[in-house]
Amino acid sequence: MSPTGMDPAAAVRTAGDALGDAIYRRVIPCLDVTDGRVVKGIEFVDLRDAGDPVELAAFYNAEGADELVFLDITASSDSRKTMLDVIERTSDQLFIPLTVGGGVRATKDMHELLRAGADKVSINTAAIAEPSLIDAGADLFGKQCIVVAIDARREPDGSGWGVYTHGGRRPAGLDAVAWAAEAAKRGAGEILLTSMDRDGTRDGYDLALLEEISRACDVPVIASGGAGNLDHLVEALAPGRADAVLAASIFHFREYRVNEAKRHLAANGIPVRLPR
Amino acid sequence: MTPNAEPVIAVVDHGAGNLRSITRAIQAAGARPVITTDPAAIVAADGIILPGVGAACAAMNRLDDLALTDLLRERVAAGVPFLGVCLGMQLLFGHQEEGDTNGLGVLRGRVRMLRPGVKIPQIGWNTVRATGDGPLGAAGSEGDFYFVHSFVVDDADPADIAGVTRYGEVFPSVVTHGAVWGMQFHPEKSSDAGLKLVNAWVDLVRNTEAGKAGAA
């Protein structure tokens, strides 16, 4: 008998029946880091040092961010060492999932980042150059550690979306939907999908792209690029689109708080984790 | 008898990747983590954590290679507090669908893939509901924790199930059997809610150690 006096099997059934079907969608702030400093620090809260990734990470954790992404936007070898230190300091103080990307070229780089305290590594250009890096990473560390980032841009003739590298300037000669499907098949645990058409526009995520990619892959899709207001997050997280949204500028500049975004999502029927 | 102020926790390093967060969480709870594969260190510890991500088969092979499989079973039988996290929880059970292998088999049940119809792996936060009064709080209480897994425990003894979660299907997300606890989620990645559970387990270690010292 359980302490409540109910038969254990009945207690398990009762508890299970009380749980809803909803699967939480995630809200993930992304910090661009170079030489150990956040490039766009948040301006609207009173932080001792808004350029310190660790302090910003702590702030976002307190705000209810579900995960954090650090993107090393220079990824020179000096910057990489600094990044390892940032990851160590962050993971020593914070107990939420941390994804790190930028300049990951080999499983050795992945191992370094994971050992420093990252939970997942994001790979982009290197995976395009050498797709077997996805398989190798998944075999060594488990697919849940491997995030494949895809920068997609609509083809001029409207036929679909191409994959681009180097900040959207260089075409990789791949179809984004086919590449996402291949990445998932090879062992990507998640797809981080950035619309280069929408990135920086604040016009909203590319919903058609999200739907195509979500249909083509059986792994979670993280939407990135285009968020300008909280309704954009609602649209992106509707069924059949993204499982998570990545956002930078709407949180870093004066507009929205993460906890405000999550309340807005909940009010619009999107299941999210809220403070209990 | 005074509770052991700073119990030593052996964190079994079977190549499971990021052990930094779990060791920091143990430190935050006031215990001293030792990452080890050394049988002597494991025997000397006040509590044992079997962490883990990755494949069941590879993990069991590594435990076998390190001659730790029987040792861990013996420590559990001796009543040493034991915490299995994620894959480490799954390894407490018997047959593992992944790689068609066997776990430690210290708890009744088996491990199988999540049923189709949902994205696998489950990656993200989900709700755990307490089935009775236990480490999670009073019966019916809920908390959110961070999950990363493709496999779940099935056919467990209902009396061992302390918490359940729904992801397409309902599965055991916290099990307790005496001093043996298992958590399918990552408490070390579940912010304050997770740290509270690590604290609760470390308290169990403290009190078990106190009992041992009192009996000696």
Image (tube, coloured by chain):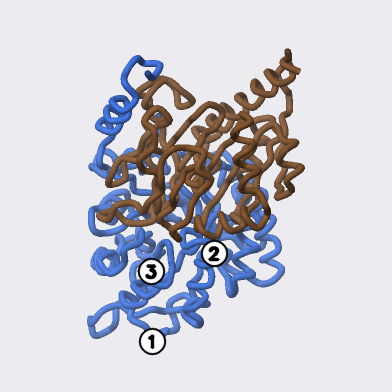
Residue appearing at x 65%, y 56% in the figure: A116
Q: Earlier in the sequence, mark 2 or mark 3?
A: 2
Viewer-side residue, B184 vs A47: B184
- Labels 2 and 1 positioned on one and the same chain: yes
- Colour of chain B in the image: brown
Residue B129 seen in the figure: yes
Q: Secondary structure at mark 3?
A: helix
Tag of residue A101: 2
Q: Quadrant of residue A11?
A: top left
Q: What residue would you read off at disc 1? A: A173
List x then y, in percent, for residue A14: 27, 27
Single out the residue that lies furthest toward the top.
Answer: B1
Q: Is A70 on the left or on the right of A210, as rendered?
A: right
Image quadrant containing the C terminus of chain A: top left
Q: What amino acid type is highlighted by mark number 2? A: Gly
- Labels 3 and 1 positioned on one and the same chain: yes
List x then y, in percent, for residue A56: 57, 46
Q: What residue would you read off at disc 3? A: A184
